[in-house]
Amino acid sequence: MSRLKIQKLSIPVVAAVMLWLKTYIVYKTSFDIKIENIMQELILFINPLSFLLFAFGIAFFFNSEKIRNRYVMATSFILGFILYANIAFYRFFTDFITLPVLFQTSNFADLGDSALTEIHWYDIIYFVDVIILAMFMKYKRKVEEFVPVKKMHQRAYFLVAFALLFLNIGLAETERPQLLTRTFDREMLVKNLGTYNYHLYDVFLQSKSSAQRAMADGSELVDIDNYVRANYVKPNEDMFGIAENRNLIVVSLESVQSFVLNNDVYGEEVTPFLNSFIKDSYYFDNFYHQTGQGKTSDSEFLLENSLYPLNRGAVFFTHSGNEYDSMAENLSKKGYYTSTMHANNKSFWNRDIMYQALGYDYYYSATDYEITPDISVGWGMKDIPFFEQSVEMMKEMQKPFYTKMITLTNHHPFRLDEEDKFIDEYDSKSGTLNRYFQTVRYTDEAVKAFIQKLKDEGLYDNSIIVMYGDHYGISENHNEAMAQYLGKEVTPFVSVQLQRVPFIVHIPGVTDQGKGKTISKVGGQIDLKPTLLHLLGVDTKSSIQFGEDLFSDDHRDFAVFRDGSFITKDYVYTDNTCYSKETEQPVEGSLCEPYKEKARVELDYSDKIIYGDLLRFYESRDYRGNLMEQQQ
């Protein structure tokens, strides 16, 4: 009888142990989780176990062997699928999936090649434990009697599970104090709590965020407003209004990172046109993308609102019903016709809904373009015909206009038709990096044709043309190949520097004919809105924003990422380490300490605005009354 009990108990335990070991192997082989000491390795090793014991332990409450086995199989497959979803997601984004991302189902159909390139036939190995478990259940020695686990054994089992949970939490809290209050670092949560506990915590955060709006009131804006006012920087008098009443054309350069500019592949320039164009423009060479999981949509959110994106999911999905004080609305008040031009499915990233919240007059989506198979590749319409057709639409727009253009060709997995390849592939172990240079080169050619088209159609002289990179194209998963190209190791410091993206401001008659200037102030996409509005003569002093005019003499060199990393004039802070920009080596942490609070406060205030939809109170009497009381 004792032997029989052991056999019955073994199925859930075997399932839990197999999934535990598989999870740890995945940690070490599929995720780039940085381990600094033996204690962190121990925490990483044990952190999946308590959850798995609880999950599979529920099987002990079933009095039917068939139901128990079905439950164990279903649980093993579901948890295995969650783990694999993180693997596939991490391959492309170097990040862990969140609940809001899973809700973005309208994006799935558009993922196309990008998703398929991250899924391989040999990934079946990630479900080998489920296969073994099924075989074990099918071929194990049949018994005549099913003996349920006694309550005494159940209590002992769950006592062990609880003990492991408390041990895990205790060690994690010792190693990383205030772990759950620093939720912007998903890798830290997975490393200390485990993948499965992290997803439970993610569910809690999602429920909490849903309740925040209902409980929010205008008084929460007082401290935020005071902070914004105290940190406002005046525009440069010479630059304020220098492009007033001109058309504003903003081009979002898909996945273009700064390292490709003024660089080559085997002697061939990657961006020959942009290299010359920046000489006739204001070019910011220390400008960083600050996107989160929303990628391109996050860059749009930063551009329009000078608020930070969320740590989880994309604001375009999670908070498209909020009220915003967008750049589009500010320009509409100044008499501008406002639009976005993007030859893609209008519902991708929930743009058709979010653009209404941002106050655009019109969204030129795929239905407005003549898209045929011969001018499509990868994610949709090629950049050259996109620009050509877009300029034709601009000719009919009410003047002055503000339009934001989003390119597509330089998108993962970076594939081109043969006739569109202007340079040879790079030669490394990363096919992604090899192809990347070719698609960037194509986009450069498209931009060249675009500028010429603007000139030909008479739109160039009375416009201001702005270009910026939306987010990285090459993730940390390709560091080995990047190190080969750069000729040096991709350290955490170098990885941060690779997050620089181009920011180019071209003002015909002002910056052309060699009158451009390279500006090395540290800034990020959070600074786009005040910088551009000031150029157009729109004051932003009354706006709730966290960016600063990059042309201002008072601009502070500072850019913070969504994970809490930041860059200043002299230092880079990432992975809990302070680096000197001069030596690229770690330095005393106290040198970065003065900036940590600014980074924390701004991310926290921005989150409060979004989660609580606080801008709906901004013009209200209640908020104004509270503000006046606070100031008195």
Image (cartoon, rainbow, N blue to C red):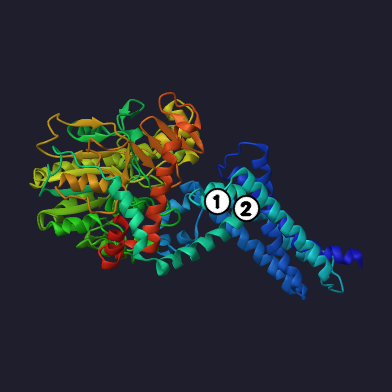
Regarding mark 2 in the picture, which secondary structure is present there? Answer: helix
Question: Outermost residue toward the top?
Answer: 583
Q: Residue at x 45, y 27 (%)?
A: 584
Amino acid under disc 1 = Ile
Amino acid under disc 2 = Tyr
Query: In the displayed structure, does residue 259 sit left or right of residue 45?
Result: left
Mark yes or no: residue 398 visible.
yes
Above or below, comparing residue 501 to residue 340 in the picture: above
Task: Characterize the local packing of mark 2: few (<14), some (14-19) or many (20 or more) Cα atoms within 10 angstroms.
Answer: some
Query: In the displayed structure, does residue 161 sit left or right of residue 169?
Result: right
Which is nearer the N-term, disc 2 or disc 1? Answer: 1
Question: Outermost residue toward the bottom?
Answer: 63
Of the pair 212 and 533, the residue shown nearer to us: 212
Above or below, comparing residue 628 to residue 406 in the picture: below
Q: In the rendered image, which quarter contains the C terminus? A: bottom left
Q: Residue at x 44, y 53 (%)?
A: 311
Nearest-to-viewer mark from 2 and 1: 1
Regarding mark 1 in the picture, which secondary structure is present there? Answer: helix
Reading the image, the residue beneath label 2 is 126
Above or below, comparing residue 179 to residue 421 in the picture: below
Reading the image, the residue beneath label 1 is 87
- Kindly check if marks 2 and 1 are in contact, taking CB atoms under 8 A apart as contact: yes
Q: Residue at x 86, y 70 (%)?
A: 143
Of the pair 127 and 348, the residue shown nearer to us: 348
Above or below, comparing residue 619 to residue 32 in the picture: below
Q: Tell me the distance, in whole angstroms, between the alpha carbons under discs 2 and 1.
A: 10 Å
